[in-house]
Image (cartoon, rainbow, N blue to C red):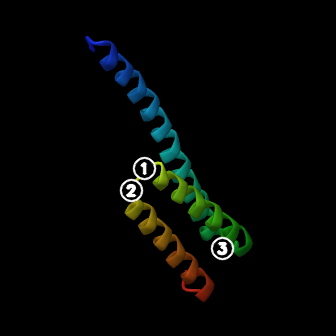
Amino acid sequence: MANHKSAEKRARQALIKNARNKSNRSKAKNAEQKLNEAIEKKDMDLTKKLFVSAQSVLAKVAQTKAISKNSAARKTSRMATKIAKLVKGNI
């Protein structure tokens, strides 16, 4: 346990930051899952809308450093690849 006033404050800040990061990572995962479900259903209109929103969510989460920028870019790229395959009819 923290012994100094500054250490106690830092511990409080860490709890708030951890909760915020967990929430942001959860938002990103939910956006990915919704997109994957739309891809499986082969619903192009919904897929396009969800891709734009998922891309936005991932960028925002990466900006807050809850996930790394490279991780967000990788996930966005993989989602775009899945959508491209769906458009071509390979899925």
In which quadrant is the N terminus drawn?
top left
Q: Are marks 3 and 2 in contact (CB under 8 Å)?
A: no
Determine crowd level at label 2: few under 14, some 14-19, many 20+ residues with C-alpha closer than 10 A: some
The quarter in which the C terminus is drawn is bottom right
From this view, report whether residue 33 is shown above or below residue 42. above
- Between residue 70 and residue 45, name the one nearer to us: 70
Residue at image location 64% in from the left, 61% down from the top: 53
Which residue position is annotated with label 3?
42
Q: Which secondary structure, mark 2? A: loop
User: Does residue 13 sit above or below 28 in this rendering?
Assistant: above
**What is the spatial separation of the Cα atoms under label 3 and label 1, in whole angstroms?**
32 Å
The kind of secondary structure element at disc 1 is loop
Q: Is 68 left or right of 81, judged from the image as shown?
A: left
Circle 1 packing at 10 Å, graded few (<14), some (14-19), many (20+), is few
Q: Distance between the residues labelled 1 and 2?
A: 6 Å
The amino acid type of the residue labelled 1 equals Lys
> Could you tell which of marks 3 and 1 lies nearer the N-terminus?
3
Identify which amino acid the numbered label 3 is placed on. Answer: Lys
According to the image, label 1 marks what residue?
65
Please state the horizontal and vertical placement of residue 66, each as a whole percent of the image: 43, 47
Extreme residue in the front direction: 6
Mark toward the viewer: 3 or 1: 1
Q: Which amino acid does label 2 sit on?
A: Ser
The percent coordinates of residue 65 (x first, y second) are 42, 49
In this orientation, does residue 40 appear? yes
Residue at the spot of label 2? 68
Q: Do the residues labelled 1 and 2 touch (CB within 8 Å)?
A: yes
Secondary structure under tag 3 reads loop
